């Protein structure tokens, strides 16, 4: 075990030195070349590279190769308050922009109808987009809302990528809370294409339903984040303290 660990540590050290000494934006050697030069298998190399990708130090683009990103600002936020990526980035002076935007008109399927308290077949507006930081994709966001809640005309004027911020600006309905599930998932084909990553890469997924003050669901969203660009935390109270007083 110690020999395996030392070999793994040696690989990490070698990759770390390579990335540190490679100018930002430079493409690294191909996987076969890099694996051969390090004397390891491509599978072992991929596992080692994932560590640096999760830290946001390298960026793998499907069909093009792996590029050095260098140290990046991380969007760090608590989960107690719902804020858009744009609002979070603004706090740390990070410039984020809207990348690919796709707006679709849909009919609610069984799952969407159940979560949005609608009838199956009701009309929906789906907003899919990619958020960029320094031109690099860092998040893939999908929001699905009742068509009357948000129509395409709303998205043609000053839409920067945040459906939440747009709803707040519109003022109707009055928003209340968001119920969110957090999970680590393997990138699906849509996320792979949107973010330009490799199939099988791990993403942080926030699945949310946004409610208005009347308890009615307003927005069903799926937010896929590249881990190296986000750090989420939550402040938790200590349970059982009253029992010891």
Image (tube, rainbow, N blue to C red):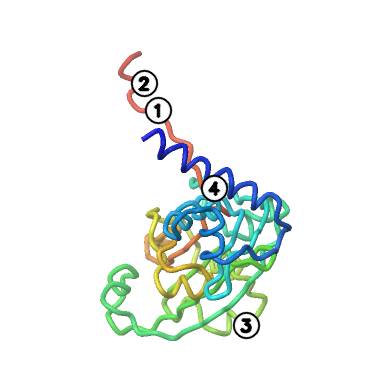
The residue singled out by tag 2 in the image is 241
Identified at 44% across, 86% down, the residue is 105
As measured in the structure, the alpha-carbon distance from the residue carrying label 3 to the one carrying label 4 is 31 Å
Q: Assess disc 3: are there few (<14), some (14-19) or many (≥20) residues with their C-alpha within 10 Å of its C-alpha.
A: few
- Cα distance, mark 3 to mark 1? 46 Å
Which callout, 3 or 4, points at the residue further toward the start of the chain? 3
Depth order, front residue of 226/153? 226
What residue is drawn where x is 52% and y is 46%? 11
* First-in-chain label (1 vs 4): 4
Say which residue label 4 marks: 231
SS under mark 1: loop
- 29 w.r.t. 82: above or below: below
Q: Are marks 1 and 2 in contact (CB under 8 Å)?
A: yes
SS label for mark 4: strand
CA separation, marks 1 and 4?
Answer: 22 Å
- Asked if residue 218 can be seen in this view, the reply is no
Nearer the observer: mark 2 or 4; the answer is 4
Tell me which corner region of the image, top left, top right, bottom left or bottom right, holds residue 41: bottom left
In front here: 46 or 205? Answer: 46
Give the residue furthest to the top: 245
Q: Earlier in the sequence, mark 2 or mark 3?
A: 3
* Residue situated in front as seen by the camera: 25 or 71: 25
Write down the residue under mark 1: 238
Q: Are marks 3 and 1 in contact (CB under 8 Å)?
A: no
Picture quarter with the C terminus: top left
Q: Residue at x 54, y 55 (%)?
A: 53
Choose the circle earlier in sequence order: 3 or 1: 3
Tell me which label, 2 or 4, sits earlier in the chain.
Answer: 4
> Please, is residue 134 above or below residue 227 in the view?
below
Whether residue 153 sits left or right of residue 115 in the image: it is right
Towards the viewer: 159 or 48 = 48
């Amino acid at each position: 075990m110690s020999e395996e660990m030392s070999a793994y540590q040696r690989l990490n050290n070698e990759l770390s030195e390579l990335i540190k000494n490679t100018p930002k934006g430079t493409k690294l050697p191909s996987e076969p070349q890099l694996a051969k030069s390090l004397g390891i298998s491509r599978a072992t190399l991929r596992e080692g590279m994932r560590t640096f990708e999760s830290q946001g130090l390298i960026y793998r683009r499907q069909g093009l190769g792996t590029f050095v990103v260098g140290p990046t600002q991380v969007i760090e936020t608590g989960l107690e308050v719902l804020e858009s990526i744009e609002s979070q980035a603004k706090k740390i002076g990070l410039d984020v922009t809207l990348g690919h935007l796709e707006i679709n008109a849909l009919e609610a399927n069984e799952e969407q109808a159940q979560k949005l308290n609608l009838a199956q077949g009701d009309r929906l507006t789906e907003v899919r987009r990619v958020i960029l930081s320094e031109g690099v994709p860092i998040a893939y966001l999908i929001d699905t809302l009742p068509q009357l809640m948000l129509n395409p005309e709303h998205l043609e004027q000053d839409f920067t990528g945040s459906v939440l911020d747009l709803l707040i600006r519109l003022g109707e309905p009055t928003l209340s809370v968001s119920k969110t599930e957090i999970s680590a998932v393997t990138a699906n084909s849509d996320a792979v294409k949107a973010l330009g990553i490799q199939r099988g890469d791990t993403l942080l997924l926030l699945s949310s339903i946004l409610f208005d003050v009347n308890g009615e669901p307003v927005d069903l969203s799926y937010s896929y984040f590249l881990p190296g660009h986000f750090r989420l935390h939550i402040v938790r109270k200590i349970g059982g303290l009253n029992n010891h007083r």
